Image (cartoon, grey):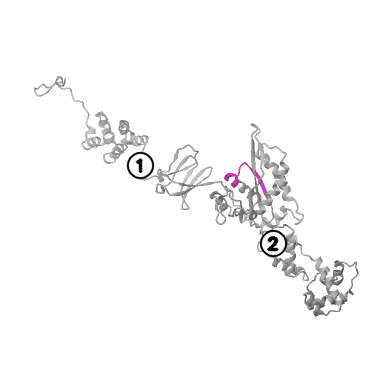
Amino acid sequence: MKRLSMRKIRDVLRLSAEGLSTRQIAASLAIGRTTLQGYLDRARDAKVVWPLPPAISDTDLERLIFPRTARDVSNRATQPEWAHIHRELRRKGVTLSLLWEEYRADHPEGYGYSRFCELYTRWEGKLSPVMRQRHPAGERLFVDYAGHTVDVVCPKTGEVRTAQIFVATLGASNYTYIEATWTQSLPDWISSHVRAFGFLGGVTAQVVSDNLKAGVTKACFYDPVINRTYADLATHYDTAVVPARPHKPKDKAKVEGAVLLVERWILARLRNRQFFSLGDVNAAIRPLLDQLNEKVSRHLGSSRRQLFEQLDKPALKPLPTAPYVYAEWKKCRAGLDYHVAIDKHYYSVPHQLLKKELWARFTARTVEVFHVGQRVASHVRTSGNGKHSTQRDHMPAHHKFREDWTPQRIIVRAARVGPNVATFAEVVMRERKHPEQGYRSCLGVIRLADKFGADRLDAACRRALEINARSYSSLQSILKNGLESKPHTRATEEPAITHPNIRGADYFH
């Protein structure tokens, strides 16, 4: 039967006492005749007549007309434990319908489904006046930086430096992790995530972050661009980065609330302390963080740690076997010298990739270059000295020739044939303006050993040095004519020839 207000019940009793029929009363008060008759029957059973005593209140009148039965008392004693219902809803796949079925299995005379949902919604509304988001266990980790910072004094210089406060909180249990870092830059941002996952002992399915530059290269309402290093971290931990929409703080309301709590519960307690290192700050934060996670919520009756152990921890993905190694990504193009610049040093790539768009991934020890997702080069990281690290396989053929042959290497190669060959090669390159101009001649001379033998070539080089023959063709001529085995004799000085047609030296003076 529809429950009417006490004011209308008083009107029903008054009009009935005045002799109006049920049809007339129903039309006058706009209520159904069946409902009206039910109230009149209840009033008659309770011996309630008009006029009512002046002292009777609406509560007293309701108690008289709707007396509590044994069933009502029984149902009231089997009220659902709403805090438990609220926690269970955070588990994956758990719905109000399922929880109601379990409730009715234990209490067959309990609430119907619609009343069950109505009462839960009323209870949940007391938690917060704003709309609450559903956060399944192990689903989301919310991350951000606190607005407040902590001053750190250098003990040597007295310089004051501010430390940033990184905050991470789980969606289902509100289990929180915080730490102090020097900056909000990419290396600190990534390192904080690694330590947060280690603190939790697992990984959530999603990481919800703000749109700071360290995490999001391009903030967009519909299609944000994630920083390549941040995406690399997500791949390593098998999670997904989901940035909050720009100017929509409610997308990360969990961490906003956690930041506020951290500022009030932790940073406020540290406001009068002086710190001399970042380690001191984190050492002071840790016991306060443990207290925060152990604090029991008055409404839910559980602490963050208890909820974490019950909800989030079993649902987290396991940590990878190897920790994440910090690496930065840089978009670049190879210049005409088929090298890319990374931190003031130049690393080679295959020469076929000249002017192609490439991605370089560099850690503290390695540099890797990728083209269309495929790794095309790998180098050992070198300090920024402005020099080049070049791999021979990356060079075109004519550059390999230049790279392979140096004056020292040519002399060593010639010495394997014979000492005179090495001397000949050294003399040839020394007499050129640039040693490279003698490379081709020296290599040709060395190859003559394949045709004429090392011994003959060494003897021919000795004879060529004696007669000051410094060319490949002269040496080849000596070998073809077999002159290397003949002794070299200087022409004896002959007397001057006199003849009328021969001009003497005086002619030219």
Residue for point 53% across, 50% down:
228
Residue 218 pos. (x, y %): 54, 51
User: In front here: 409 or 196?
Assistant: 196
Provide the residue designation for mark 1. Answer: 401
Provide the residue designation for mark 2. Answer: 89
Residue 393 pos. (x, y %): 41, 46
Q: Give the residue type at disc 1.
A: Phe
Quadrant showing the N terminus: bottom right
- Graded by Cα atoms within 10 Å as few (under 14), some (14 to 19) or many (20 or more), the crowding at tag 2 reads some
Residue 229 pos. (x, y %): 55, 49
First of labels 1, 2 by sequence position: 2
User: In front here: 131 or 17?
Assistant: 17
User: In front here: 457 or 176?
Assistant: 176
Q: Give the residue type at disc 2.
A: Leu
Q: Which residues fall within the magenta stretch? A: 177-190
Q: Would residue 133 be counted in the magenta stretch?
A: no
Quadrant showing the C terminus: top left
Would you identify the image quadrant in which residue 101 lies? bottom right
